[in-house]
Amino acid sequence: MLNRLIVSTMPLMPRWFIKLFSRRYIAGEAVEDAMNLCTRLKAEEFETTLDILGESISTVEEANASREAYIELIRRVSQQSFSKNISLKPTALGLNLDFELAKENITAVIRFAHENDFFVRIDMEDSPYTSQTLDIYRSLRAEFPRIGTVIQAYLHRSEADVTSIAAEGGNLRICKGIYRESPTIAFQDKEAIRENYLQLVKTMLSARAYVGIATHDIYLIDTLEAYIRDKGIPAENYEFQALLGVPIEHRLEALRDAGHTMRIYVPFGEQWYAYSSRRLKENPDVAGYVLKNLFKFGK
Ligand SMILES: Cc1cc2nc3c(=O)[nH]c(=O)nc-3n(C[C@H](O)[C@H](O)[C@H](O)COP(=O)(O)OP(=O)(O)OC[C@H]3O[C@@H](n4cnc5c(N)ncnc54)[C@H](O)[C@@H]3O)c2cc1C
């Protein structure tokens, strides 16, 4: 109750509070912070994917600056020993402004990534961008095989999308979906989303199309881990994925120790505010946790 109140009054809160909360979810503001964290995670045998926070751009210049930031990131990370793997949000590269602009920017990043042997995942945003994001992904896949995108289990259309992408031998991260979507296009019921999630991952696994199982839902993790074992799915067909900072009771370590690839999504950058607000809205309990820690500092 208190946590929900905190979240509803969030726009009125000082940024330092949000920043305090966001620390656990974000590697830092600078590339060095993110690279240090990835190096530490690699030492613990976790794979990573790096995301530059920047989803709220409003000009062509900002979209182009995001492109250059990714190119610089690839340049820096190519010297490192951790995963050469990045995730990007189409609107950060201009999809909210103009389809062709975003496509050109995304293509430029992916071309440079390809030359440097990187894998690039195109994140999925809210439903106005779903078809355009899939179009960009499909148009680039023939030339650049080491790319993938994301499908959200809450969307009704996802079953058809996954069926065709699995048949094409595509590469998908499957997540529940984080945006608020209308009941006309998206399941609202938690159990329906879970059921769809399982179905979508199984469709990918049965087709031996690569799938990133991105969830912190222990029921889904356990069910899919058992499915993978029972069906003898080879380790090179899938990975488990989690967001940096989400506490899931040592489950990540257990998955890693059982021999599954475990990838942590590591966001960083100056535009931490939008990302943090979304995390806080999604899990208001975290607000209470931060508040408790605040009072501890005071003692
Ligand atoms: C690697 C990765 C990449 C993602 N990429 C996308 C994307 O491209 N597009 C998109 O729409 N969504 C993306 N998501 C977010 C996803 O869609 C869900 O909103 C989010 O993962 C929560 O769903 P869940 O499956 O973890 O299950 P839930 O049932 O929501 O959560 C399971 C448990 O984890 C805890 N938990 C979940 N999230 C948090 C959190 N942020 N902080 C603290 N505890 C938490 C919950 O309290 C709960 O106990 C991504 C998620 C992951 C893990």
Image (spheres, rainbow, N blue to C red):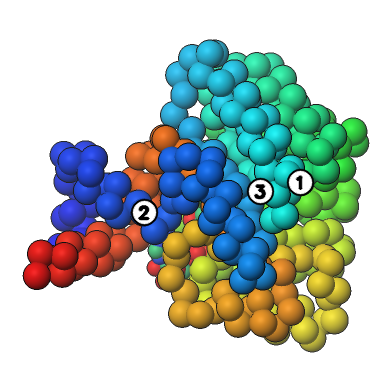
Residue position for label 1: 119
Whether 257 is drawn above or below 281: the answer is below
| Residue at image coords 82%, 50% | 170
Amino acid beneath label 3: Val
Amino acid beneath label 2: Arg
Q: Report whether the residue tagged 3 is closer than 8 Å to ligand 1.
A: yes
User: Quick check: marks 3 and 1 in contact, CB under 8 Å?
Assistant: no
| Residue at image coords 62%, 71% | 44
| Tag 2 secondary structure | loop
| Tag 1 secondary structure | strand
| Residue at image coords 84%, 59% | 209
User: Is residue 142 found left or right of 217 in the rendered image?
Assistant: right
Residue 111 in sight in this render: yes
Quarter that holds the C terminus: bottom left
Q: Give the residue at the far top of this rendering.
A: 60
Distance, label 1 to label 2, CA atoms, is 26 Å
In front: label 1 or label 2: 2
x, y percent for residue 250: 51, 80
Looking at the image, which is closer to me, 73 or 260?
A: 73
The disc at residue 150 is 3
User: Quick check: marks 1 and 2 in contact, CB under 8 Å?
Assistant: no
In front: label 2 or label 3: 2
Number of residues whose C-alpha sits closer than 10 Å to that of mark 3, classed few (under 14), some (14–19) or many (20 or more): many
Along the polypeptide, which appears first: circle 1 or circle 2?
2
Q: Quadrant of residue 41?
A: bottom right
Number of residues whose C-alpha sits closer than 10 Å to that of mark 2, classed few (under 14), some (14–19) or many (20 or more): few
Looking at the image, which is closer to me, 88 or 125?
A: 88
Looking at the image, which is closer to me, 131 or 57?
A: 57
Residue position for label 2: 23
Along the polypeptide, which appears first: circle 3 or circle 1?
1
Whether 40 is drawn above or below 109: the answer is below
